[in-house]
Image (cartoon, helix red, strand yellow):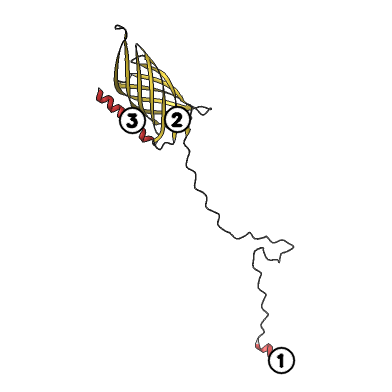
């Protein structure tokens, strides 16, 4: 049992390192109830998005109370987002957790039995984007090993946001170009266009040699 708990703690300690380049980050409260044991649950979570395509890493801490016991759970879950092209975003996933259990022994007054166990859970849930920009979610966890048999949780991401995208590169400077030519008007049809070189004067006509001789004798 101790070896399994240490392994789960090691996994929870290493997993956040996979979330260094996250395009989406959120945190928020959550609450609900569990079955086996039957308890009320409150807690909080963080969320790193983009650890892999459509995959989020969601660690959380829960405090459950009731049924003559209390449980503090440290969870590391993965959510795979399903694209529905709507405001609703369902997801499936799984994770592991370490649970610190304290049982109140009514028979021996003032004596508590504490234990540390670990287990895993399968997850199905969905979140929706509200008009305020917050995201609300609801999910169900089915536990195995020493995890609670079932948890039904709801919560919100009041500070959900997209990480800033890198600035686009600066545009290249404009290339030099020839100044625009002025269009010819009716009054200056013969005037050269603006920016054009003046036309060279026409060469005088060249007479044939026989015509030049006739002019000389006359």
Q: Provide residue 183's location: percent of width, then percent of height.
A: 68, 60
How crowded is the residue under tag 2: few (<14 C-alpha within 10 Å), some, or many (20+)?
A: some
Frontmost of labels 2 and 1 is: 2
Q: Quadrant of the C terminus?
A: bottom right
Mark 2 or 1, nearer chain start: 2
Q: Which residue is mark 1?
A: 216
Callout 2–callout 3 Cβ contact below 8 Å: no
Q: Secondary structure at mark 1?
A: helix
Question: Between 109 and 144, which is closer to the camera in this rendering?
Answer: 109
Residue 190 position by quadrant:
bottom right
Q: Secondary structure at mark 2?
A: strand
Q: Looking at the image, can residue 145 be seen?
A: no
Question: Between 75 and 2, which is closer to the camera in this rendering?
Answer: 2
**Vertical comparison of 14 with 103: above or below:** below
Task: Give the number of the disc on residue 138.
Answer: none
Question: Between 32 and 181, which is closer to the camera in this rendering?
Answer: 32
Q: Which residue is mark 3?
A: 13
Q: Secondary structure at mark 3?
A: helix
How much space separates mark 2 and mark 3, taking CA atoms? 19 Å
Q: Provide residue 117's location: percent of width, then percent of height.
A: 29, 21
Drawn side of residue 161 relative to residue 53, left or right:
right
**Vertical comparison of 45 with 181: above or below:** above
Drawn side of residue 153 relative to residue 109, left or right:
right
How crowded is the residue under tag 1: few (<14 C-alpha within 10 Å), some, or many (20+)?
A: few
Q: Which residue is mark 2?
A: 26
Drawn side of residue 202 relative to residue 75, left or right:
right
Q: Provide residue 121's location: percent of width, then percent of height.
A: 33, 24
Q: Residue furthest bottom?
A: 217
């Amino acid at each position: 049992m101790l070896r399994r708990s240490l392994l789960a703690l090691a996994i929870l300690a290493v997993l956040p390192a996979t979330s260094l380049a996250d395009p989406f980050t959120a945190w928020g409260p959550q609450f609900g109830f569990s079955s086996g044991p039957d308890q009320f649950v409150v807690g909080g979570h963080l969320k790193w998005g983009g650890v892999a395509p459509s995959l989020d890493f969601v660690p959380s801490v829960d405090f459950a109370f009731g049924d003559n016991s209390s449980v503090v759970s440290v969870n590391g879950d993965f959510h795979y987002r399903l694209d529905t092209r709507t405001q609703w975003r369902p997801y499936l996933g799984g994770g592991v957790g370490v649970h610190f259990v304290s049982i109140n022994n009514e028979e021996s007054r003032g004596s508590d039995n504490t234990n540390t166990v670990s287990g895993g859970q399968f997850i199905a849930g969905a979140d929706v984007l509200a008009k305020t920009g917050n995201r609300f979610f609801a999910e169900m966890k089915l536990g195995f090993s020493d995890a609670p048999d079932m948890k039904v949780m709801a919560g919100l991401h009041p500070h959900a946001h997209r990480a800033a995208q890198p600035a686009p590169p600066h545009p290249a400077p404009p290339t030099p170009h020839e100044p625009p030519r002025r269009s010819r008007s009716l009054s200056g049809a013969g005037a050269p266009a603006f920016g054009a070189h003046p036309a060279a004067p026409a060469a005088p006509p060249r007479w044939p040699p026989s015509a030049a001789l006739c002019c000389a004798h006359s």
